[in-house]
């Protein structure tokens, strides 16, 4: 019983990490077709801002919101300056975002130093069935689920969402119907960057804040997006669920390293079976 | 034309005036000096062989294709420097060949996208539904599941949300069964009579042209080469010559 509960917690924890790592990347890739290799640096930015604001004495949720906001604003600026000129040129945008990533990592190293003092993890632990679980990580699972729900509502209920989906499907037609598509792309890139910043903020209390910390999230993020495919909702969540279980099982069986290896093997296997990702397969099934 | 007369807005001034328009793909002009004027309340058909550049003309008017040379004015205001969405908001209602409805969005969501056309004005979905009641019945349905005729109605209804000052219809009869083509013709003529909205109709379907248009511009080799009257439209031999070549 206790070990089952433990495994369940591990699955949830992996799921949350995969979802939160991937969402920003998935939004930008799914809605705009841009593979953002600077994704990890937006996460790092969110984490840096979060710890800096928290150390000023502001409450952690406010600090995390600041992290998301700053990352989002930087995202919008970068979209205007760089990404905008590379739409329809996927390879060029990969190179450009990779460049941004290198500059951001090195620039942060120079400006901030090799690490920032962190903030302590809030809350303590609860014990259940003989094991104790950190409350903050349980909270992160709830946040991941809530965020999926919020994004679903954003894209399916709000006016921005309707216009964004139309723009993604037929950009020329959306324009001919009065949509300022440049603004839609800008906001969408900003949203993806803000989600990455939020992830950085959320995990900031749990890790060491270094300029290269984005890398920790990158593999998970890419694994989830590759498996998920282009549709954020019917892709990312199921992909994170499957990979979360694989990783949790392998980790509890043989430890962290084997967990990572299993994740990679699962990705390779699933790419062979579903080359267009979970969402591509589901959309094809549905016709 | 009316250049020598004092301008009386809405009466003598054409809604759309195109002069010397050149546009094309990859530096190769398809349009080589199009001159065309559409006056208030008119329905003008544009005909010409397949591949002559009718769609290219429409795309240049809405701005999806940059003009290489020439001038486009809407009610006297130059459009050439405006991006597509600003031209649409300025009053060009573009219904493309192939309809281009957002297939995975519902009928109502398709209309909601077009609310972007209304700046500083309350969008009125009800008017679109009044024009095409079937769309109201189907408003929750995905647009991709509609029949071709219903998709065409949706494509037209979308631009009507913006209360455009000119409608551009590119082959609205394509792939649609004849009875629905008749319905659409009838609805468009009624709308034109009621609101006075001018329509530029690119068509190959002679029945639709006859049912709607008051005159007909013939396109050939990248220019407008002839202007046929309503009487010419009834003359089979003239029409066959221009459509079939
Ligand atoms: N995207 C494009 N790139 C390059 N050439 C194009 C493109 N679209 C059209 N053309 C060419 O431009 C010319 C005009 O095409 P256009 O689509 O305007 O013709 P059309 O009169 O609308 O024909 P149809 O009656 O078949 O609809 C054709 O020779 C076509 O091959
Ligand atoms: Mg055409």
Image (cartoon, coloured by chain):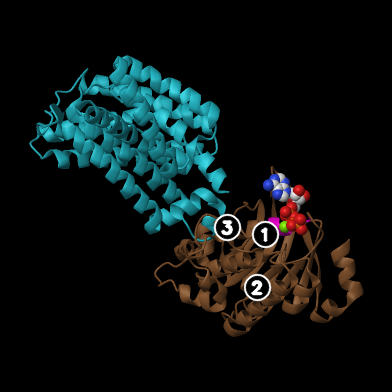
Q: Give the CA separation, mark 1 to mark 2.
A: 15 Å
Mark 3 / mark 2, whichever is N-terminal: 3
SS category of the residue bearing label 1: loop
Q: Quadrant of the N terminus of chain B?
A: bottom right
- Mark 1 or 2: in front is 1
Q: Which residues, given as a range, are shown in magenta? A: B52-57
Residue B82 in the image: x percent, y percent?
A: 53, 57
Q: Quadrant of residue A273?
A: top right
SS category of the residue bearing label 2: strand
Quick one: which residue is furthest to the front in this view? A1
The residue positioned 39% from the left and 20% from the top of the image is A262
Q: Looking at mark 1, is its residue's CB closer than 8 Å to ligand 2?
A: yes
Q: Mark 2 points at which residue?
A: B199
Task: Work out whether residue B22 or residue A87 is closer to the camera in this orientation and state it.
Answer: A87
Q: Mark 3 points at which residue?
A: B144
Mark 1 / mark 3, whichever is N-terminal: 1
Mark 1 / mark 2, whichever is N-terminal: 1
Q: Name the residue under label 1.
A: B97
Q: In which quarter of the image is residue B11?
A: bottom right
**Marked residue chain, label 3:** B
Task: Work out whether residue B39 or residue A149 is closer to the camera in this orientation and state it.
Answer: A149
């Amino acid at each position: 019983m206790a070990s089952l509960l433990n495994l369940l917690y591990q699955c949830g924890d992996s799921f949350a990490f995969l979802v939160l790592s991937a969402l920003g990347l998935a939004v930008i890739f799914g809605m705009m077709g841009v593979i953002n290799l600077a994704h990890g640096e937006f996460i790092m930015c969110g984490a840096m801002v979060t710890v800096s604001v928290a150390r000023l004495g502001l409450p952690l949720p406010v600090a995390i919101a600041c992290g998301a906001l700053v990352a989002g604003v930087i995202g919008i600026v970068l979209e205007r300056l760089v990404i905008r000129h590379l739409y329809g040129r996927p390879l060029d945008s990969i190179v450009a975002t990779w460049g941004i990533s290198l500059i951001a990592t090195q620039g942060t190293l120079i400006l901030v130093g090799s690490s920032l003092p962190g903030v302590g993890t809030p809350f303590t632990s609860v014990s259940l069935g003989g094991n104790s679980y950190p409350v903050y990580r349980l909270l992160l699972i709830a946040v991941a689920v809530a965020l999926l729900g919020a994004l679903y509502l954003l894209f399916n209920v709000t006016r921005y969402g309707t216009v964004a989906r139309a723009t993604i499907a037929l950009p020329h037609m959306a324009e001919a119907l009065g949509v300022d598509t440049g603004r839609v792309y800008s906001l969408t890139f900003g949203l993806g960057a803000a989600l990455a910043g939020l992830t950085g903020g959320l995990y900031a209390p749990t890790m060491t804040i270094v300029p290269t910390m984005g890398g920790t999230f990158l593999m998970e993020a890419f694994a989830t997006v590759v498996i998920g495919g282009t549709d954020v909702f019917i892709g990312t969540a199921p992909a994170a669920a499957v990979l979360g279980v694989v990783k949790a099982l392998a980790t509890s069986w043989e430890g962290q390293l084997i967990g990572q290896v299993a994740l990679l093997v699962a990705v390779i296997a699933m790419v062979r079976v579903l080359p267009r990702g979970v969402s591509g397969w589901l959309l094809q099934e549905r016709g | 034309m009316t250049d020598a007369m004092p301008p009386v807005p809405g009466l003598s001034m054409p809604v759309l005036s195109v002069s010397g328009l050149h546009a094309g793909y990859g530096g190769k002009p398809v349009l080589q000096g199009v001159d065309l004027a559409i006056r208030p309340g008119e329905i003008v058909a544009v005909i010409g062989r397949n591949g002559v550049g009718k769609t290219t003309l429409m795309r240049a008017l809405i701005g999806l294709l940059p003009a290489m040379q020439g001038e486009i004015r809407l009610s006297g205001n130059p459009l050439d420097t405006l991006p597509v969405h600003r031209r649409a908001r300025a009053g060009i209602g573009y219904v493309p060949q192939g309809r281009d409805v957002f297939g995975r969005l519902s009928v109502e969501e398709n209309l909601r996208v077009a609310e972007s056309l209304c700046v500083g004005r309350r969008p009125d979905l009800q008017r679109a539904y009044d024009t095409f009641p079937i769309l109201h019945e189907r408003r929750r349905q995905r647009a991709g599941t509609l029949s071709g005729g219903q998709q065409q109605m949706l494509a037209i209804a979308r631009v009507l949300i913006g209360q455009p000052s000119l409608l551009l219809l590119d082959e609205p009869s394509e792939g649609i069964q004849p009875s629905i083509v008749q319905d659409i013709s009838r609805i468009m003529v009624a709308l034109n009579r009621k609101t006075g909205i001018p329509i530029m109709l690119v068509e190959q379907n002679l029945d639709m042209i006859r049912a709607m248009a008051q005159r007909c511009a013939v396109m050939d080799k990248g220019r407008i080469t002839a202007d046929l009257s309503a009487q010419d439209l009834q003359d089979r031999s003239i029409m066959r010559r221009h459509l079939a070549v």
